[in-house]
Amino acid sequence: MTPTPLRKDAARNRERIVAIARALVDEGTPLQLNDVARRAGLGVGTVYRHFPTAETLLEAVATPCLEALTAHGEQALTEPDPWRALETFLYRTVEAQVTDASLSPVTVAPTDALPRTTELKEALRSLGTTLLDRARAAGLVRPEVSAADLTSLMCGIAYAAQVHSRDPGDLVATAHRYLSTLLEGLNGKAPKA
Amino acid sequence: MTPTPLRKDAARNRERIVAIARALVDEGTPLQLNDVARRAGLGVGTVYRHFPTAETLLEAVATPCLEALTAHGEQALTEPDPWRALETFLYRTVEAQVTDASLSPVTVAPTDALPRTTELKEALRSLGTTLLDRARAAGLVRPEVSAADLTSLMCGIAYAAQVHSRDPGDLVATAHRYLSTLLEGLNGKAPKA
Amino acid sequence: MTPTPLRKDAARNRERIVAIARALVDEGTPLQLNDVARRAGLGVGTVYRHFPTAETLLEAVATPCLEALTAHGEQALTEPDPWRALETFLYRTVEAQVTDASLSPVTVAPTDALPRTTELKEALRSLGTTLLDRARAAGLVRPEVSAADLTSLMCGIAYAAQVHSRDPGDLVATAHRYLSTLLEGLNGKAPKA
Amino acid sequence: MTPTPLRKDAARNRERIVAIARALVDEGTPLQLNDVARRAGLGVGTVYRHFPTAETLLEAVATPCLEALTAHGEQALTEPDPWRALETFLYRTVEAQVTDASLSPVTVAPTDALPRTTELKEALRSLGTTLLDRARAAGLVRPEVSAADLTSLMCGIAYAAQVHSRDPGDLVATAHRYLSTLLEGLNGKAPKA
DNA sequence: CATGAATGAGCCTTCATTCAT
DNA sequence: AATGAATGAAGGCTCATTCAT
């Protein structure tokens, strides 16, 4: 199953690299493999062996976040109220987008570097579809909105929040506000209250 | 009034440069002054004389579009129905954003290279504020939405549309659809129909 | 005699250019003809017409100072004490070198751009020779020292003072101190007192 | 101890670069890293890796000479006659300045690129101070002259020699002559003989 | 005479990627 | 596996000088 069990030290290196990369992403520094290598105290070659491209590394960085999001989505499936389920999922999604800089490039990219990424994106799409379908079935959502639209719109909301706030402290609040505004619309003819 | 009347040949070169830059922007190529110079058949120095930085050139490219948008906004002020006025203005705005790649970086940039850009951005902000205030006064808009939010949200919508459609042919339609969805929300408790 | 009487406005321009160049020299900015033109509010061409090279302009800037130095030298010729005469002349020379940044490049240059510069450098050389010869004839100076040495040594002293002091306020004092040290040596076996 | 042992081929390249740079310095060509790379038959990046700035490279070029000078200085400390000790050290210093074009910029620079340079400059300063103090204690030197003055004056002497002689063959002789003249003065009221 | 637009060689620097050790 | 030196294309920018207007 797992491609190659990976020697213990190699695994340690891999983790180290991802950790450094995560730190860089968080501080807004562009991911450069040379840079990562230097900070990790490893040779460039080592980094390239583990992550042949910057995209690969970025996806590795994003993976835990995508997994957490998936978990939230699965959680949401258990929520009986279809509107609350969808809503909660979308809130978690924009929060993630706005909080974690690795997410939006990975989400937007038309092709993935890691199979795991494809899996997770697929899972999220599928969860979105399910949640959306339920809400639509309950007449709570405009019929023309698709799951793909949901993805794009969450990216858009996150982007809008970033455009709005220089101050990263406000980001989540702004994103929430924008999403709530949008939702009233998604909710369409059936006003929430 | 006009800073320097500019010699005829210089003016021709300037136009040529802007035209090339516009073409590059339209085909999605990043603006590089050396590149522009080569394609224009001009010396690098000439390009640098007219446009000391890539931002300056980009703003010059964006200017006509910003002017057109401003004109539309002023047109909208004459519309008696405050909701229709706002709505129309926002539609024009997302259309522009989605159609013209020079717009979003210029809109988002915290500082401007050309005074003319500052003027136009200021004018648009002011128009947005007026249109928004009228609609708000008529109780047609959620009170917590500001003019700055409008700007960010239009950027977000445009971004979402781009994320959604690889095919540029669908861009405007998608952006429209997303905006209409958002508007239902902006409209809030007073449903459109 | 004078090459071409020069129209009144042309003369005004010339003066303006020299004045700007002097200011640049004084603030330590390297002389660039484009830069001079811009600051003078003139076209580059105008500056190039008057001063075909930066050296030409620099010499024009240095000329008044060289003239003043020459005047001092001629004054020194009237001093009866040959040692005092030489000494005074050398003090004036290092002061000038250290005070006026246009001087050392012009002094050092093997070829001159302006005939006037050649004239003045020649006059100074000749004054130096006379003053030195008198002192030497009085047995007050080491016989192996030549007038050319005097020039080089004054440049050296000025250079040394500049190396020593970041603070331009100390420059003259330092240069004086260094010169006095050197002079005790020039005075050789016949101590000054 | 040694920061990083450096691979054999890398060391060869480094030496090659320094050698080329030395040749350029000797022929009076300004040090340009691209140029060095081309002449060394190496990629620019290689040169930049070893020497991030031209100053770094220049200091690397100057290092052996500074070391030799330091060695001479330490040698001079063993000389019993304090005047001869100082004198010899200063002669070696001007010889070096006049012979090796890398020296004067490095000496004059207020900040160093390599720690080794700082060390060596510090060592030379300290040697100069010691030698000067001894001579001063013996009443052989004007009291107001400091070690810093010595440095500046040696630079000045070297500069003067260069101003004097186009012909590099005379440089050392001229510098010697100028230094001897200066020394008679440093010796001051206590004539050497 | 004056103007100032145009030129373009030339220098600097970065960075993704390869490959010998 | 790991290393990190080497590569060199690519892009950025300046400035001395010319020449059409």
Image: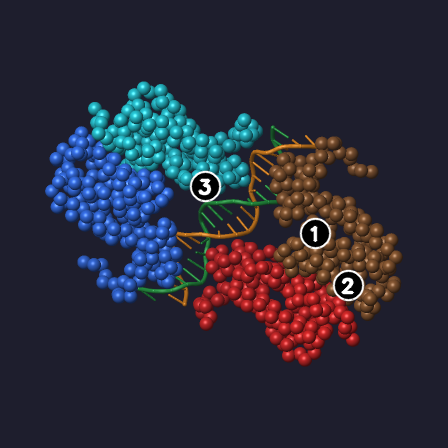
Chain colours: A blue, B cyan, C brown, D red, E orange, F green
- The percent position of residue B48, horizontal first and vertical second, equals 52, 39
Q: Which residue is mark 3?
A: B32
Q: Nearer the viewer, residue D173 or C98?
A: C98
Counting other residues with Cα less than 10 Å from the Cα at mark 1, is it few (<14), some (14-19), or many (20 or more)? some
- C-alpha separation, residue under disc 1 versus residue under disc 2: 20 Å
- The percent position of residue A80, horizontal first and vertical second, equals 11, 42
Q: Is residue C141 visible?
A: yes
D60 up-or-down from A69: above or below: below
Q: For residue C99, which numbered disc appears in the image?
A: 1
Under mark 3, the amino acid is: Gln
- C-alpha separation, residue under disc 3 versus residue under disc 2: 61 Å
- Residue at 65% over, 54% down: C168
Q: Chain of mark 1?
A: C
- Residue at 29% over, 47% down: A99
Counting other residues with Cα less than 10 Å from the Cα at mark 3, is it few (<14), some (14-19), or many (20 or more)? few
Counting other residues with Cα less than 10 Å from the Cα at mark 2, is it few (<14), some (14-19), or many (20 or more)? many
